Amino acid sequence: MTGTTPGFWQSPDTHPRLGTESIHVWKIDLDLQAEEIRNLRDCLCADELTRADRFRFARHRHRFTAGRAALRQILGNYLGCDPTDVQFDYNEHGKPSLRSPQSLISFNLSNSHTLALLAITLKRRIGIDIEYRHRATNGLQIADHFFSPREAEMLRALPTALQKTGFLLGWTRKEAYIKAIGAGLSYPLRTFSVVLDPRDTPRLIEIEGAATEVNDWYYTDLNPHTDYLASIIVEHSSADLSMFRWKTKEING
């Protein structure tokens, strides 16, 4: 599973089955009508409602609500349970995992601006990240401070026209990896390197202190929308990648 997806996102009428080699990615629209958001709040637990209500602006509250409700609805369909029955544990860095119902499902959720992506597989670590293309960034300066020295050199070596895309791709790939290992931004970004060149195959190049581990991970870049970049990383190779659109009305299990 390497390279870039063609960007075909299915809208299934029945919920897809997750096979042992499957990787499913769900695209979630976070900008919904107010009535839809009110209905989706019924899916959330008390803690999630409290977290949603802490946001100062309504659009941020609504997007958080949509993302968490989608996570619960999608996982509930895989697990054969009501969305409100899905329970999570969180590691020390805040990464969620399933507590109940017990399952072999691994998942990771990422959001940016008005879109979220949810990656789901079985029995292996997985990470995903999505970034909005049009955010203002000084990629070279950020790379100098937070990327590995090798990555900073690679970014400066790119043609000027490719540097912003190269930076954003590098950021999504790095974020996907640290989310897959459950470390979050506490993990030093300078201690591992990924390919930044948009023309090259996405992959891990090196991990400080774990040279052979790069061979255990596989990337695919995703095309959720022309305004976004995204990348997914998973342990062990698999070509069985499927992409779906989430709909606020639950599809049949």
Image: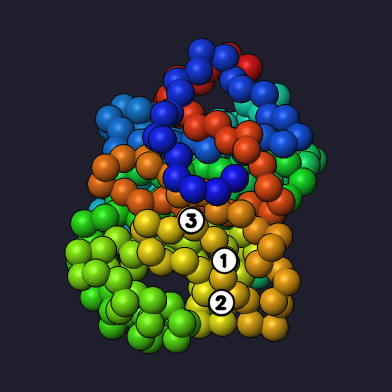
Residue 192 numbered tag? 2
Report the mark closest to the observer, 3 or 1: 3
Residue 182, position as x, y percentages in the image = 64, 64
The amino acid beneath tag 3 is: Thr
Q: Which element carries disc 3, helix, strand or loop?
A: loop
Side (left or right) of 36 relative to 226: right
Q: Quadrant of the C terminus?
A: top right
Picture quadrant where residue 140 is located: bottom left
Gap between marks 3 and 1, in whole Å? 10 Å
Residue at 20%, 64% (x, y): give it. 161
Residue 236 numbered tag? none
Report the mark closest to the observer, 3 or 2: 3
Q: Earlier in the sequence, mark 3 or mark 2?
A: 2
Gap between marks 3 and 2, in whole Å? 17 Å
Residue 209, position as x, y percentages in the image = 69, 83
Q: Earlier in the sequence, mark 2 or mark 1?
A: 2
Picture quadrant where residue 45 is located: top right
Q: Which element carries disc 2, helix, strand or loop?
A: strand
Which residue is under mark 1? 204
167 lies above or below 71: below
Residue at 21%, 57% (x, y): give it. 134
- Which sits in the foreground, 2 or 102? 2
Which residue is under mark 3? 201
Contact flag, marks 3 and 2 (Cβ < 8 Å): no
- Which sits in the foreground, 9 or 28? 9
Residue 51 visible (yes or no): no
The amino acid beneath tag 2 is: Phe
Contact flag, marks 2 and 1 (Cβ < 8 Å): yes
